[in-house]
Each structure stands twice: as structure tokens, then as C-alpha cells.
Amino acid sequence: MSATSNKKVFLSIFLIFFGTLAFCQPKISFPKENHDFGVVKEGDIASYEFEFVNQGDNPLVISNVKASCGCTTPFWTKKPIAPGEKGMVKASYNSKGRPGNFNKSITVTSNAENRITRLYIKGLVDNLPEYTGAELAKSPKLVLSKKLISMGKVEAEQPTPVRITIQNTGASTLSLKNISSSCNCVGFGPAKSFDVPVGKSKEFTLVYRPKRTGKTVDDVLIYSNDLSQPTSKLSIDSEVVESLQTQSPIQQIIKKF
């Protein structure tokens, strides 16, 4: 066998070996990488667990989790995570003596092919007023018909309508003040009024425009004049795929097959 042939054989073995190693790596996947706590009462500790799954072919091990500040304490699954199994990273924010907005990152280091993953938490620390029983009795009360909406497959960067029903079970008119989302990709549709009368239900349309592809859960916070619960959380569960409108004609033909 010639030297050239030997080199080709060696190169083929090399590529197969390292290609196999790359294929057999663990892969960490977080359906949700952002969490918005909304309004947090100063002095409370706000905590949230980010769930992940090992989508690779070898055990996944998280070697370190580091927060961007000492006010955030992370905790995570220490044992190896087998392929297909789940684990979690918990972030706890101590709001004592820290009024105002916060936006913190948590860096997750593992043996996955995507070695570094960053998670984000945010919110507003405020001295929430204490209401009397009489004031609370006169307050409106926001009730969501669903707290989790499954959208199935949606296209990235394309506006998708999400319909929600809100009921007012309180004693005065409910007014929706604002809306925010962990992905900054959800807004109100063109509603003429954001009020819900006492004892009534009203359907609203949200406009969902996801940015990153993959399976994801995005939180939506709805702010209202409900004194007992000024923020209500809704979660949108979806699988975001690449938009056909951003693909070339050849890519669109290939995708059909």
C-alpha cells in the first residue's frame, strides 16, 4: 500500500473516531432560560428552578454554577444525569436591602458539547403596601382560565396569536395595566379596552413572536389593579421552528421532503 493510501486510511479512521466522540457527547437543554419574578416584596427570597434534560448520548455532569452577584445563590443537581433524564438548577435571589429592578445571570458549566449555558432572572423589588381587609374586599380579582397554553409548533420571528380568557371574580372593575415576558416577545393585540366588569369574563389576544428556535417555555406577566395579586403569570409552551419566510427557496423545497 502506498504512503498516500496509508494517509487516506489514517485520515478516515481519525475522522470516524473523533466524529463518534462528538456524536456521543452529552447535551444539556433548558426549555426555559429566562425567568421574570415580577414584583417581589423587599425582604423576600425569590426562588426558581430551571429544569433541563440531557439530550445527548453520555452522562451529563454539571461542574459549576456561578451567579453574576452574591445576592443570587445557585443550587443544582450534583449527580450525573443519564441520557434522556432531567435535572435542575435553582436560583434564589435575596431582595433584602435591594429595592428596584434586578437582572442577573447564572452561568452553568458542564461536560456537554455546549459547555457554557447562561440563565437569567429578573424582577422588581418593591415595598408593597399593606391593604386592610376592607380594601381587599372591594378589590377586583383576576382569574386566568389557563395558566399554561400549549402552542405546538410556531415559526420564529412570526407573530402568532395567543387567546386567553380573564375572569373578574372581585368586587370592582378589573383593569389590565401592562404585560411583560421573559423572552421580550409577547404583547397585547389591538384590544380597544383592557377592563373586565365585575363577574364577567373577557377574551384577549396576545401576540407571540418567539426569537430562538427549539422547545421553550416563555413566561408572561400580566399587571392589573388586583390588590391581592398585582401580577399574574401565564406560561406559553411551544416548539419554535425556523421561519419559512427566512429560508431560501431551495431550503423550503428540502424541508418539504
Image (cartoon, grey):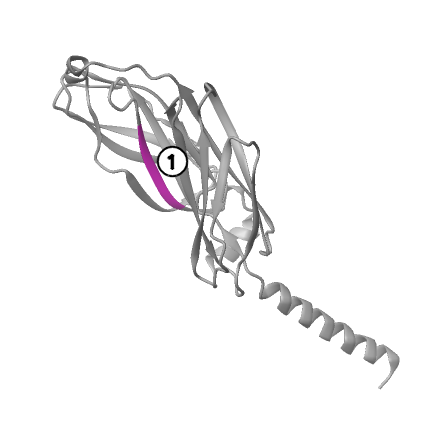
Rendered position, 196 above or below 106: above
Front residue (pair 152, 52): 52
Q: Is residue 225 left or right of residue 133?
A: right
Q: Quadrant of residue 200?
A: top left
Give SS at disc 1.
strand
Q: Is residue 166 left or right of residue 107?
A: left
Q: Position of residue 235 (x, y in %)?
A: 34, 38
Image quarter hosting the N terminus: bottom right
Amino acid type shown at disc 1:
Asp
Question: Can residue 184 be seen at all in this image of the molecule?
Answer: no
Front residue (pair 120, 198): 120
Residue lying furthest bottom: 1
Q: Quadrant of residue 222?
A: top left
Whether residue 234 is in magenta: the answer is yes
User: Which residue is located at x 32 percent, y 35 percent?
Assistant: 234
Q: Is residue 77 left or right of residue 66?
A: left
User: Which residue is located at x 44 percent, y 61 percent?
Assistant: 84
Q: Position of residue 196 (x, y in %)?
A: 20, 20
Q: Position of residue 60 (x, y in %)?
A: 53, 59
Range shown magenta: 232-238
Residue placed under numbered mark 1 in the picture: 219
Question: How many residues crowd mark 1 within 10 Å: few (<14), some (14–19), many (20+)?
Answer: many
Q: Is residue 41 left or right of residue 70?
A: left
Q: Position of residue 141 (x, y in %)?
A: 19, 23
Whether residue 72 is in magenta: the answer is no
Front residue (pair 43, 185): 43
Rendered position, 210 above or below 241: above
